[in-house]
Amino acid sequence: MTAETSSASASASASASASAPAPAPAFRYAAVTFDCADPAEMARFYGELLGMSVLYSADDFVLLGKEGATGLGFNRLADYRPPTWPDPAQEKQAHIELGVDDLDIAEKRLLELGAGKPEFQPRPDRWRVLLDPAGHPFCITTLV
């Protein structure tokens, strides 16, 4: 092979590579992060509730996780205002659904951990709405 042939071959390969689509990057669902006033308190509550350990901790952020599970993060927001659910004055942005075997027993334990319970319960026979220490609504249900 001559230098001229080698150069032409390299140029053709480079041209083919440039036009081929790049492989798609791999994405992994790593965590959901909630804004709050006190990341350490939120990590304590959810860590105990879900059996997760602190993977990373700083003054303004805590990440919980465990092997093979999606993480849960808490980010300090200086002017955090808790949702006022069911009043739409300060809407909730997201909430977690947790599966349980017994609604009454699970609710009792969550209240002991520091959850709150709003007066309004849309379907207490099927799920219960509770509030975490930062005021985010979350649900427990026997449906999952």
Image (cartoon, rainbow, N blue to C red):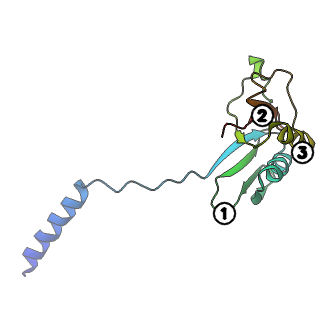
Q: CA distance from mark 1 to mark 2?
A: 25 Å
Of callouts 1 and 2, which one flags the residue occurring earlier in the amino acid sequence? 1
Q: Secondary structure at mark 3?
A: helix
Q: Which residue carries the number 2 mark?
A: 136
User: Which amino acid type corresponds to the residue marked 2 in the rendered image?
Assistant: His
User: Which amino acid type corresponds to the residue marked 3 in the rendered image?
Assistant: Leu
Q: Secondary structure at mark 2?
A: loop
Q: Which residue carries the number 1 mark?
A: 67
Please give the name of the residue rendered at 43% of the width and 55% of the height, measured from the top-left corner: 25
Please give the name of the residue rendered at 84% of the width and 47% of the height, measured from the top-left corner: 45
Tags 1 and 2 in contact by the CB under 8 Å rule?
Answer: no
x then y, percent, for residue 141: 73, 36
Q: Residues within 10 Å of mark 3 (few under 14, many from 20)?
A: some
Q: Secondary structure at mark 1?
A: loop
Using the image as rendered, state which of residue 4 and residue 110 is in the foreground.
110
User: Which amino acid type corresponds to the residue marked 1 in the rendered image?
Assistant: Glu
Q: Residues within 10 Å of mark 2 (few under 14, many from 20)?
A: many
Q: Which residue carries the number 3 mark?
A: 113
